[in-house]
Image (cartoon, rainbow, N blue to C red):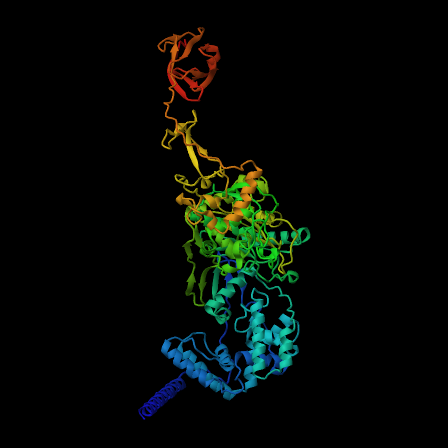
Amino acid sequence: MYHRVVRKSKKRLAKKIWLNIFALGLLTTGLILVWAARLQLPDVNSFNTRVVSQSTKFFDRTGKILLFNIQENVRRSEVPLSEISPYLQKATVAIEDDTFYQHKGIRPLSFLRAVLVNATSLGFSQGGSTITQQVVKNSLLTRDKSIARKLKEWVLAIKLERVISKDQILEIYLNESPYGGNIYGAEEASHAFFGVSASSLNLPQSAYLASLPQAPSYYSPYGNHRDELTDRKNSVLGKMYENNLINETEYLSAQKEKVEFKPPQRIGIVAPHFVFYLRSILEEKYGKRALEEEGLKIITTIDVPMQQKAEEIVKKYALLNKGKFNAENAGLVALDPKTGQILAMVGSRDYFDKEIDGNVNVVLAKRQPGSSFKPFVYATAFKKGYTPDTMVFDLETEFSTRCDDESKPLYTSDDPETICYNPENYDQIFRGPVSLRNALAQSLNIPAVKVLYLSGMKDVLQTAEDVGINTLNDPDRYGLTLVLGGGEVTLLQLTGGYGALANDGIKSVPNGILLVENGSGEILESFEPQQNNALPSDVARIVSDILSDDKARSPLFGERSTLYFPDHQVAAKTGTTNDYRDAWVVGYTPSLAVGSWAGNNDNRPMEKKVAGQIVAPMWHEFMVYAISTLPDERFHQAAPINTDGLSPVLRGIWQGGETYFVDKYTGVIVDKNYPEEKLQEKIVPSVHSILKWINKNDPQNGIPPSDPNEDSQFSHWEFAVRKWAVANGYGTDAIKPNIFSTAPLSEVSFDVIGYDEKSEHAPSSPISFTVVSAGSSRLSKVEIFLNNNLIGIYKNSPFYVSFNNREIAGIIREENLLKIIGYNASGLKVERFFPLNFKLN
């Protein structure tokens, strides 16, 4: 009984709450409608009062050269609804307003939801806009985002539906909607995209057109989001099917049918890939209507002379490469690494070239970077404590833990071609021990995979993200192939990442906008560099030093290659994917970063040539021009690395992991604190992989791992190294000597007989004296210098010295200094100095 009473009470309470909410909603709605009725509203009976659009213009960095006028040559053709395909009418209604023919201008539930949400949030994000509302908004009202404007829109939509028919409203919408660029209205869009009139559009064509008006720049069939456009087309078809506007057969057939778009027509525009890149960004930020109608003035970062030179060079080499290397397209981007400002952007050999989908911007396309990603792997290693002198072995090595040391699967069901991983170098040569400096400069693959493992995948991906490469977000997908270009990046992000290396580790986000003003001259935004400390400065400087070291890279490219500039310090790195689908060169100075790409948009492989042959000549020619317009800046040098306490393998010693010190003259083992001039380091010959000598996660702690076999890669690396060691005469490990001599070092001393340092010597008189041993260690050699010029070496004891003025005439001065150096058989030496006086008159 008690529980029944409680349940009834709860039901009464819930009913009361809902009645109150409903009453509040009705009251709020009524008050708003009463208030709205008193608003000054445009006359819905006339469309002559429509808002006049103001043209948005894009300018170069000087603000003087017009790049593009959005409203210039606007293409718009109005046709009656009867001349617009019923498929397009249905597709538009399905995706924009599926209750268009049922509501009275607004959708009450959407209206109420918008009122409540906007009232509680004090914002105005909820609109529930119908097609009628969109016509009102675009034709009769200003673009401001006030509550009053929105309420006017709702009221006018209701009034408009009383004045004109649904078909008239839909006709206005289809004739005035933007479909991308300077194309407005369904008739013009049909001719531009498909070469047919609006009346002849088929179902899939209609679905594509209906997909565009809400984001025509983003979904442009000529841009970088073709897949997203196709997905939205399929969503339109799905909505049509759900609303019984097409049958199942039509739905399935239209999904599969391939639709061909006509190539874009030439329009008056400078730097088209760059302009449409910015337009997409600004459209997302301010809305497409603002760009199309509010008269914005955009001052961009583009350097027009540099842009035009880049376009000329890219087209020239893309056409040359088509015949020579089967690489018909190319792209290039140039940045100021100190600010991130984009100075030039060329997204294809020709934006209007239909043969290669030239409108697609390859600077923004995700492609595999090949070895051009390696600098960020090595930067991570240097950040972790490895040095440019660190030694690794460039040997044929298996890296998959599912295969044995000889690249045979550990499980019989596994396919070795899919699970084993033993990459080769570009020339199929294995070089044995190499330093990280030479490995990076020469782009050696096996050392690079080892450096990726030593650095750690997580840390490498973090470095990539820190420098602005944010497309590598699936570490499980890549594995150790990442260092050879296993992920995908964009040329813009990759070049921006190199810009962080150029700028002492400070990352400047790429940006193409200097200033945005509205039609009234009010500044909406102005350029401010977006920067972060991506890398320690010394790490960036080390990488730049390596990538600009012509001697270090000469074994790969030869001396004075296309990466070399005799009068400038330029760092550069190439990259070629294993399947020869992408070729890259990215390079930089402290004031310029330039990335270039060559290949085919459809991913056809090129001829099997390295990037140095395919894309480097194009990159080099542009760099020659660009750096001639900029100040000649040099990279800062990294601070010297303190090698005290470092493992020998980090200091360039590959023969073993243990050293000791001897007196360089006697060979006696001594303490490290022995006089430096007599100290010599010796290695205990013991050839092993680096994983035996260091803790890979903390390489500078100087403590080798207690059991290197615990590392999953040790067996594979060690197998290759020991095999090489035996073949090269290093098969047996040596033992460190443990006997220290306690005998005192012999002293070296001498006397000079027959020489008077106070005498004045006549020009005709010979100068003679004898040098004899005076200490416990006998002399084996004597050298005589006058004013630091060697005038004699004597090797027979006693050492009789004689010379005359004629032999030394050219080096005599008013004050002269005679230096005598005596050596014993062990190389120990002693020096003595004497004045030598001459009668010069």
Left or right, 569 with respect to 578, comes to left
Towards the viewer: 770 or 780: 780
Q: Residue at x 58, y 84 (%)?
A: 244
Q: Quadrant of the N terminus?
A: bottom left
- Classify 34 as above or below 434: below
- Classify 466 as above or below 148: above
Towards the viewer: 267 or 202: 202
Q: Residue at x 54, y 70 (%)?
A: 216
Percent coordinates x, y for residue 817 in the rendering: 39, 16
Number of marks drawn:
0
Percent coordinates x, y for residue 640 in the rendering: 41, 40
Towards the viewer: 491 or 218: 491
Towards the viewer: 380 or 345: 380
Which residue occupies the extreme left position in the image?
2
- Classify 568 as above or below 9: above
- Classify 247 as above or below 550: below
Q: Quadrant of the C terminus?
A: top left
Percent coordinates x, y for residue 120 in the rendering: 36, 78
Which residue occupies the extreme bottom position in the image?
1
Percent coordinates x, y for residue 774 in the rendering: 38, 14
Residue 393 visible to the viewer:
yes
Residue 587 visible to the viewer:
no
Q: Residue at x 66, y 74 (%)?
A: 196
